[in-house]
Image (tube, grey):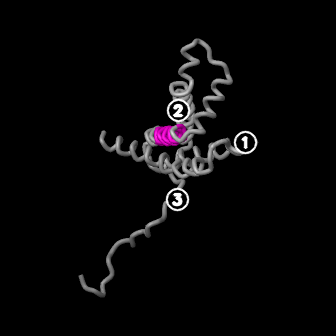
């Protein structure tokens, strides 16, 4: 080919940027967020029952004050706060995984968006409580910082699972 000669045929199209929300499905994100919320609630309640309410439960009764007292005891201990962070992050990872599996494309993006929804729901719950949250500020900040990466990790795991099949 001569250097002065132009190539024949149409010119290649320029690469067009893909928008962040291109290909995002709302249904997988909502289902993943619901899985996250329900799993978090159930596992926190199970944790409270197993570690803080075991004795009254074995004695045959469980007054409502006992649950409230157990929750206060849990959030006043370092172990309880650590358990809340771990349970929250694992459940958000599960929600991100579910969203990634349901979406079948852009699994990490769907998982991260589940984390974002989880963050928003958590912030709304804290704001609607009326008075200040009983949780320490560092705990809430750590939970907010972990939400999106945990959801993205779930999406990443779903993506890896899909590649193996």
36 or 81, nearer to the observer = 81
Q: Is residue 28 above or below residue 62?
A: below
Of callouts 3 and 1, the N-terminal one:
3
* Residue reaching furthest to the left: 1
* Residue marked by disc 3: 19
Q: Is residue 136 above or below residue 14?
A: above
Percent of width and height locating residue 59: 57, 13
Counting residues from the start of the chain, the first of labels 2 and 1 encountered is 2
The mark closer to the camera, 3 or 1, is: 1
The disc at residue 128 is 1
| Residue numbers of the magenta segment | 80-96
**Where is residue 8 shown, x and y percent of the image?**
32, 75
Q: Which residue is drawn at 63% across and 34% down?
A: 72
User: To which quarter of the image does residue 52 belong?
Assistant: top right
Image vertical order of residue 45 relative to residue 85, above or below: above
Going 56% across and 43% down the picture, which residue do you hit?
Answer: 26
Secondary structure mostly seen in the magenta stretch: helix
Q: How crowded is mark 3: few (under 14 residues within 10 Å), some or many (20 or more)?
A: few
What is the distance, in whole Å, between disc 2 and disc 1 at their CAs? 21 Å
């Amino acid at each position: 080919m001569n250097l002065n000669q132009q190539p024949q045929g149409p010119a290649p199209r320029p690469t067009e940027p893909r928008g962040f929300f291109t290909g995002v499905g709302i249904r997988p994100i909502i289902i993943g967020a619901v899985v996250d919320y329900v799993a978090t609630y159930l596992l926190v309640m199970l944790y409270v029952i197993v570690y803080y309410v075991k004795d009254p439960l074995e004695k045959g009764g469980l007054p409502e004050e006992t649950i409230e007292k157990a929750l206060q005891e849990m959030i006043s201990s370092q172990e309880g706060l650590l358990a809340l962070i771990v349970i929250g992050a694992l459940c958000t990872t599960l929600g991100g995984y579910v969203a990634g599996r349901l979406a079948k494309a852009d699994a990490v993006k769907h998982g991260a968006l589940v984390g974002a929804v989880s963050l928003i729901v958590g912030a709304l719950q804290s704001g609607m409580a009326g008075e200040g949250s009983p949780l320490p500020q560092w705990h809430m900040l750590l939970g907010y910082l972990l939400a999106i990466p945990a959801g993205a990790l779930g999406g990443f795991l779903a993506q890896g699972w899909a590649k193996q099949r």
